[in-house]
Amino acid sequence: MKHLSLKSMTAGAVALALSATATLAADLTMNVGFGAPEESLYGRFGKIFEAKAEEYTNGSIDVKLRCCNQISSEDEAFKAMQLGTVDGFFITANNVSPHWPLMDVTVLPYIFQNKEHLDRVLDGDVGQFMKDKLQADTSVHLLAFGPALYRDFYNSVRPINTMADMEGLKIRVPKNEVMIATFEAFGANPVPLAWSETPTALQTGTVDGGDNGTSFIRDMKFYEFEPHLVILEHFVAFAPLFASDSFMNKLSDEQREQIMRAANDAGKEFAAQVASETEEVRKWLATEGGMARTDPDKTAFVEAAKGVQQEFAEKRGADFVDLVAKIQAAAE
């Protein structure tokens, strides 16, 4: 009896210890940071991810959103995830490039020719290749690309119905060599200007036009002196959600799948919201804002952009050329 009792006690102790270990492993906090305010696009994306992550894991992972550079700045966050000092972070894609140069592929003009092409890339083999390659090269996990944020074009001279209509327009561009080369390829005369100089240059006619995110055109009231709105969608920006290998290794296989699914589903849901809102702002600009909207055929623009893609890809080496080719092939 004593022997059986001892065995029972030992088994019970082991079960209790395993239970305690499982409980500790299940109750995890994921601190996810971003540099913008809570009500920003990052914060809105984060709230959807938070809800889905806690739902899919049945509350075993508690996502805490940390806005406004509380846990890191956007410039430092990627390195912090490599070191394991930050669990997760939303980072604008171009700020990832210093750590993983292949991310610069997303800033090339018309690298995604339309929404269908973009979806095929991000949701298909090429998107998975980018996630796997990033993780292999840096240890950081790309959980979701998030919504596509397009730049719309505007000018004060004429409507743009074909690429020929761009000829000779003085276009404000950031001091960015890809953007300068892009507008040169379109036939315009790009004028590199700091952002602080741009509103005055537009109002005084020093430049004829420029491009910005759709909401920004409304927020800055550019419609008051730029009567022509042109839907080119030539540049696209992303703010992907990343996670550290240190955090992902704390998860069970099931939890890892749940977190990745939550990020993917949150990205798709928020992308649909952003696309709808973008179109609403465009409609506002063309009605209440008084702008004349054109949606030119993009065929000639896309062909001109391919030369820019190739030029800059060749400067970056074989891996970059290969990735550009993979993305271009997905358009066919």
Image (tube, rainbow, N blue to C red):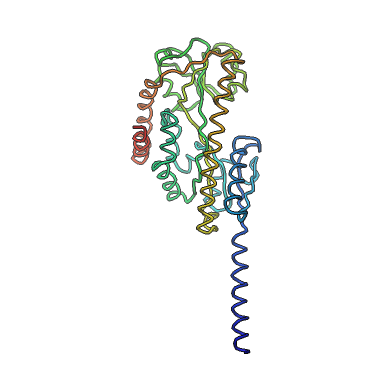
Which residue is drawn at the image coordinates 53% and 34% (left, top)? 272
Left or right: residue 29 compared with residue 129 = right
Which residue is drawn at the image coordinates 60% and 86% (left, top)? 4
> Which quarter of the figure is the C terminus placed in?
top left
Q: Does residue 41 lie above or below 25 as drawn?
A: above
Tell me, yes or no, if residue 315 can be seen here: no
Of all residues, the one furthest to the top in this rendering is 157
Front residue of this view, candidates 19 and 250: 19
- Quadrant for residue 76, please give it: top right
Which residue is drawn at the image coordinates 60% and 46% (left, top)? 32
Q: Does residue 191 lie above or below 265 as drawn?
A: above
Q: Position of residue 204 (x, y in %)?
A: 58, 11
Q: Position of residue 209 (x, y in %)?
A: 52, 16
- Quadrant for residue 121, please give it: top left
Front residue of this view, candidates 256 and 38: 256
Q: Position of residue 72 (x, y in %)?
A: 61, 45
> Which quarter of the figure is the N terminus placed in?
bottom right
Q: Does residue 41 lie above or below 283 as drawn?
A: below
Q: How many marks?
A: 0
Q: Position of residue 168 (x, y in %)?
A: 43, 12
Tell me, yes or no, if residue 215 can be seen here: yes
Left or right: residue 164 compared with residue 159 = left
